[in-house]
Amino acid sequence: MKKILIAAAASLAGLAAAAVAQEVTDADGNGTYSLEELMAAYPDLTAETFATIDANGDGAVDPDELKAAQDAGTLAN
């Protein structure tokens, strides 16, 4: 019985983590994410937060900047 409860708890934890994960799509295929592309995954994202995430200030978020924002907790991953 304990094994079943442990397995069930582990499954629920995995589902909860999957529900929190965000799917970010590079809709135009240019290798970076625009404010609009990130807002599709993060509807509460503001232009101010986007500017913070865009560390190099080029107007787009590259995969490394996105990962850094997720790792820092600025965006959920």
Image: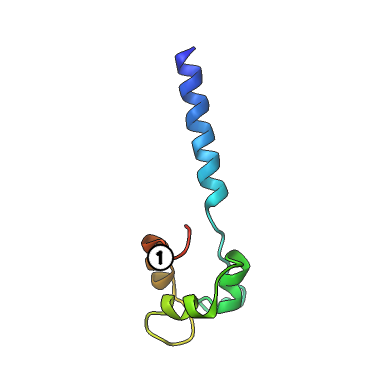
15 relative to 32, above or below: above
Dividing the picture into quarters, in which one does residue 24 lie?
Answer: bottom right
47 or 31, which lies in front?
47
Please tell me how crowded label 1 is: few (under 14), some (14-19), or many (20+) other residues with Cα within 10 Å: some
Extreme-bottom residue of the structure: 58
Q: How is the image coloured?
A: rainbow
What residue lies at 52% left-to-right and 53% top-to-bottom?
21
Extreme-top residue of the structure: 1
Count every numbered label the image shows and give the total.
Answer: 1
Residue 62 location (% of width, % of height): 44, 75
Residue 76 location (% of width, % of height): 48, 59
Q: Is residue 26 visible?
A: no
49 or 58, which lies in front?
49
What residue lies at 42% left-to-right and 62% top-to-bottom?
70
Residue 42 left/right relative to 50 = right
- At label 1, the amino acid type is Lys
- Tag 1 secondary structure: helix
What residue lies at 61% left-to-right and 67% top-to-bottom?
43
Residue 44 location (% of width, % of height): 58, 68
Residue 77 left/right relative to 35 = left
Dividing the picture into quarters, in which one does residue 28 lie?
Answer: bottom right
What residue lies at 52% left-to-right and 26% top-to-bottom?
8
Q: Is residue 27 visible?
A: yes
Residue annotated with mark 1: 67
55 relative to 38, above or below: below
